[in-house]
Image (cartoon, grey):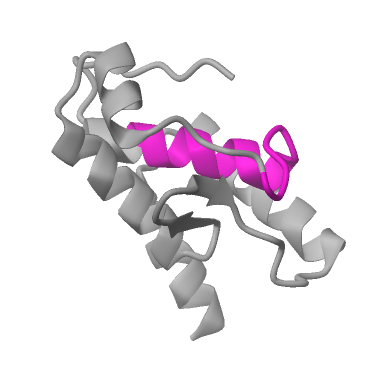
Amino acid sequence: MKLEVDTASPVPPFEQVREQLAGAILTGDLSAGDRLPSIRQLAADLGLAAGTMARAYSELESAGLVVTARGRGTRVAEPAGADEAVRSAADAYVAAARRSGLDRDSTLALLRARFG
């Protein structure tokens, strides 16, 4: 998988990377157990600071999408058991939000409002 960062985008680079990796995990392009590049390697490949990549990985780990183990690197986590229909609906929602030009915060705010 090739990651790209648009430095002219108002979306911070760590968020662009996080979104791309999360999308690849949620759509199955990256499978449970797949190893992600090291933070340093990904930073070098994208021409970004290691701290930027560390933040993206940290947020993915907080979301339960990846796990990091010393000496084993960062790997895609086993799915938490969410129903496939819910995953598909979430993917469709995110895709629609992006097509509409909504940023992450606006998209999440809409979802939170629906839960009321």
Image point (45%, 30%), residue name? 37
Q: Main secondary structure of the magenta part?
A: helix
Count of all numbered marks drawn on residues in the image: 0
Q: Quadrant of residue 70?
A: bottom left
Q: Is residue 95 visible?
A: no
> Percent position (x, y) of residue 87?
74, 58
Q: In the image, is residue 47 above or below residue 89?
A: above
Image point (76%, 70%), residue name? 82
Quadrant of the image for the N terminus?
top right
114 relative position to 59: left or right: right
Image point (14%, 28%), residue name? 49
Along the viewing direction, whichever of 94 and 53 lies nearer the viewer: 53
112 relative position to 35: left or right: left
29 relative position to 77: left or right: right
Q: Which residues are magenta?
A: 16-33
Along the viewing direction, whichever of 79 and 101 lies nearer the viewer: 79
Indicate whether residue 42 is drawn in magenta. Answer: no
Image point (66%, 55%), residue name? 90
Q: Quadrant of residue 28?
A: top right
Q: In the image, is residue 10 above or below residue 103?
A: above
Q: Is residue 86 visible?
A: yes
> Percent position (x, y) of residue 101?
41, 33
> Percent position (x, y) of residue 59?
35, 56
> Percent position (x, y) of residue 26?
67, 47
Indicate whether residue 25 is drawn in magenta. Answer: yes
The residue positioned farthest toward the front in the image shown: 71
Q: Quadrant of residue 7?
A: top left
